[in-house]
């Protein structure tokens, strides 16, 4: 007897190799997968604009990354003694304009350079609800704790979403080398503050738009991350105490399905060994001079060197 419905990840046409370069952008769940890719010592870059949730914010970021157009003073909002970029996450806010500009433009140029060599891109959408900042008449990526009276909340139209999706694909395809693979996902993070009905409506619009657009691009595909949480795991024990964000166990479950179908066997072995090494490096002995610990460290160094010999990029940098 079967007591649950499992989701299937369709094997990738061009899976991730140990020398692949993976760029990810979008909601905080994309960051969870990025962390695992990074822990596995693959070449990754995540969210150069910070966490982004909706299609227009991601479109704005991708357009800027494509054009490599730096930000300037007039792009900022000054509120509560801080300089704020409406295109970025609040982690870029600063009391000093020059510091915020420096951080934002460095991140933008770093993202542009990485994308020009990217082999795989993961895009995660979280919501179709957006906030228009009335004084500037722009749709913001984040409200930055500015009072609600300055915003108008609205649900993106189907046309706005599909148009943004198509332009994102075209821009990324123009930047990256031939053979680029783009994976779209829908975040399983539940935006309950919008309301349960409103959250489902938002997710449904995003899901429909992704499947409509992806069908026209052979190098684009959909990863059933959302369905894995909602239909496969389907239990609140796989969500944290806030009942909104998936647990580490749930993320690992998604990772296992993703890595088994989207990493080559060679890459999967490489990443699995690096996971073990990373865990071993976190071991804190009570005595740094203990002979058994010194032997353990020597053998660990040998394992790291064996892994380093397999790639051209630097791995386990802090342990060189």
Image (cartoon, helix red, strand yellow):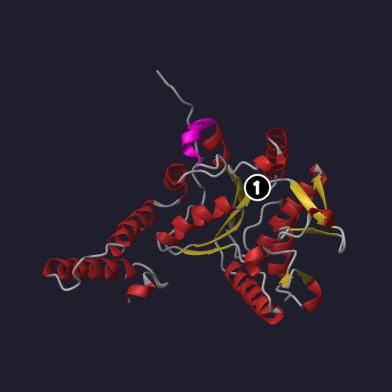
| Above-or-below relation of 177 to 194 | below
Q: How many marks on residues?
A: 1
Q: Position of residue 304 (x, y in %)?
A: 29, 68
**In the visual, does 165 lie left or right of 46?**
right
* Residue visible at 17% across and 71% down in the picture: 294
Q: Is residue 311 visible?
A: yes
Q: From the viewer's perspective, is residue 23 above or below residue 155?
A: below
Residue that extends furthest to the left in the rendered view of this protein: 291
Residue at far bottom of view: 98
Residue at the far front in the pictured view: 80
Location of residue 198 with respect to 61 vertically, above or below: above
Q: Residues within 10 Å of mark 1 (few under 14, many from 20)?
A: many
Residue labelled with disc 1:
126
> Considering the numbered disc 1 on the image, is that residue within a helix, a strand or a loop?
loop
On whether residue 291 falls in the magenta region, the answer is: no
Q: Position of residue 177 (x, y in %)?
A: 60, 65
* Residue pictured at 67% horizontal, 61% vertical: 172
310 and 32: which is toward the camera: 32
Give coordinates of residue 46: x percent, y percent.
56, 62
- The percent position of residue 41, horizontal first and vertical second, equals 41, 63
Q: Which image quadrant: the N terminus?
A: top left
Q: Is residue 232 magenta?
A: yes
Q: Quadrant of residue 174?
A: bottom right
User: Residue at left 50%, top 64%?
Assistant: 44
From which residue to which does the magenta span run? 231-240
């Amino acid at each position: 007897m079967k007591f649950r419905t499992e989701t299937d990840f369709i094997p990738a046409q061009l899976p991730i190799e140990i020398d692949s370069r993976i760029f990810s952008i979008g909601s905080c769940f994309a960051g969870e997968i990025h962390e695992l890719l990074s822990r596995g010592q693959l070449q990754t870059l995540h969210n150069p604009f910070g966490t982004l949730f909706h299609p227009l914010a991601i479109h704005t970021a991708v357009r800027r990354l494509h054009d490599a157009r730096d930000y300037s003073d007039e792009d900022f909002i000054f509120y509560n003694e801080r300089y704020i970029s409406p295109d970025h996450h609040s982690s870029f806010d600063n009391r000093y304009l020059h510091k915020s500009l420096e951080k934002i433009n460095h991140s933008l140029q770093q993202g542009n350079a990485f994308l020009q060599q990217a082999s795989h891109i993961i895009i995660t959408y979280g919501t179709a609800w957006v906030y228009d900042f009335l004084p500037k008449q722009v749709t913001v990526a984040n409200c930055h704790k500015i009072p609600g009276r300055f915003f108008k909340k609205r649900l993106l139209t189907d046309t706005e979403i599909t148009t943004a999706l198509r332009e994102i694909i075209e821009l990324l395809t123009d930047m990256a080398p031939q053979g680029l693979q783009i994976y779209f996902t829908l975040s399983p993070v539940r935006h309950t503050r919008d309301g349960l009905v409103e959250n489902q409506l938002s997710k449904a619009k995003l899901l429909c738009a992704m499947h409509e657009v992806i069908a026209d691009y052979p190098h684009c595909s959909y990863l059933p991350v959302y369905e894995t949480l909602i239909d496969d795991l389907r239990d609140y024990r796989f969500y944290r105490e806030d009942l909104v964000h998936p647990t580490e166990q749930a993320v690992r479950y998604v990772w296992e399905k993703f890595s088994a179908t989207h990493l080559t066997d060679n890459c999967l072995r490489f990443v699995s060994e690096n996971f073990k090494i990373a865990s071993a490096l976190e071991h804190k002995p009570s005595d740094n001079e203990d002979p058994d610990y010194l032997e353990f460290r020597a053998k660990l160094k040998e394992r790291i060197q064996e892994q380093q010999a397999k790639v051209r990029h630097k791995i386990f940098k802090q342990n060189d």
